[in-house]
Image (cartoon, helix red, strand yellow):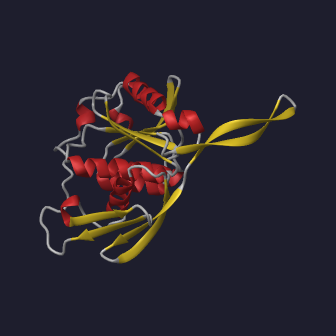
Amino acid sequence: MTDFFEKKEILRFENNKFKKTNDYIVKEEFYRLIVNGEHYYDIAASPVYVEEMALGRAYCEGLIDGLDEVSEITFLNDKNIIKIKSKKDFKNKNKITKEKGDYFIKNKIKPSLIFKIINDLSSKSKIFQKTGGVHNALLADKKGEMIAFREDIARHNTVDKIIAYILKNNFDISNKILALSCRISTKIINKIAKIGLPVIITQSPPSLNAVNIADEKSITIAGFVRKGRMNVYTHSERIKK
C-alpha cells in the first residue's frame, strides 16, 4: 500500500486559521511503453500492477490482439520502461471467451446486486480513503462477488489493468460486471466494447458520446450509482424492473 503514497507535511486552513499537519499524497510515475522496439506511449500511472497496465493498454490500442501474441514482456524498473515483444506468427489471437447468448437478458440483474457491488468498490478503496487521489475499478461475477480490484491515479489505467487481468485468466465475460468510480468517457467505453463486457456501473455519469457507443454496442450503463439510486442510460433490459 505504501507504494501508492507518501506522507508529507502541509499547511491546512481550517476554522479560520492555518495549522501544520500531515497529509497522504498519491505517487505518480511516468512509464514508457515500447512494443517491438518502437516507442508508442508515455503513460502516467501509479507504481503498482505496471505490467498489467502496459498489457491492457497495448491490447486496447490494437498493438497486440491477445496474450498469446506476446513472446516477452520486460519491465525495466530503474528506467520506468516496459518492453513488449510480439510474435510475427500466431494462432488463436484473442483468448477472451464469451458464451453464446446474453446471460443477463435471461438472468436479469437485481438493483440490490448493483448497489452491493458499488458498496464493495467503495469499501475496497483504501487508497482513495487515505488520499482521495485515485480511481478504482472492480470486476464482479454474476453473484456480485469480487474477482479483481485495481486502483490508479488515472481512470484509463484502472480499466487497462482489469482488461489485462481478464486476458491473463481467460474466463467467460458474458456474465461479468465492471464497476468504476470514474466518469465513463469515449475512451473508457471503447475499451469496454473491445473486451466485450456487457455491463458497466459507475458512481459517476457517462458522456453523451459514451452513451451513444454503449447503445450501439449493446452495453448496459448504469451511472450515478449511490445510496439506493441510479440512472440506467442504455440497455435497461438486463436489469430487473
- Quadrant into which the C terminus falls: top left
Outermost residue toward the bottom?
Answer: 38
Residue 142 horizontal side relative to residue 4, left or right: left
Which residue is more in the foreground, 20 or 29?
A: 20
Q: In the figure, 35 relative to 195: above or below?
A: below
Total numbered badges shown on the rendered structure: 0
Toward which corner of the image does residue 138 lie, by quadrant?
top left
Q: Nearer the viewer, residue 128 or 222?
A: 128
Q: Residue at x 44, y 64 (%)?
A: 80
x%, y% of residue 131? Answer: 59, 39
Residue 148 in the image: state x and y as whole percent. 33, 39
Which sits in the foreground, 115 or 230? Answer: 115
Where in the figure is residue 106, as x and y percent of width and height? 23, 31
- Say which residue appears at 41% left-offset and 72% top-offset: 40
Name above or below for residue 142 compared with residue 11. Answer: above
Residue 3 x %, y % = 48, 46
In this view of the protein, can residue 172 be seen by the observer?
A: yes
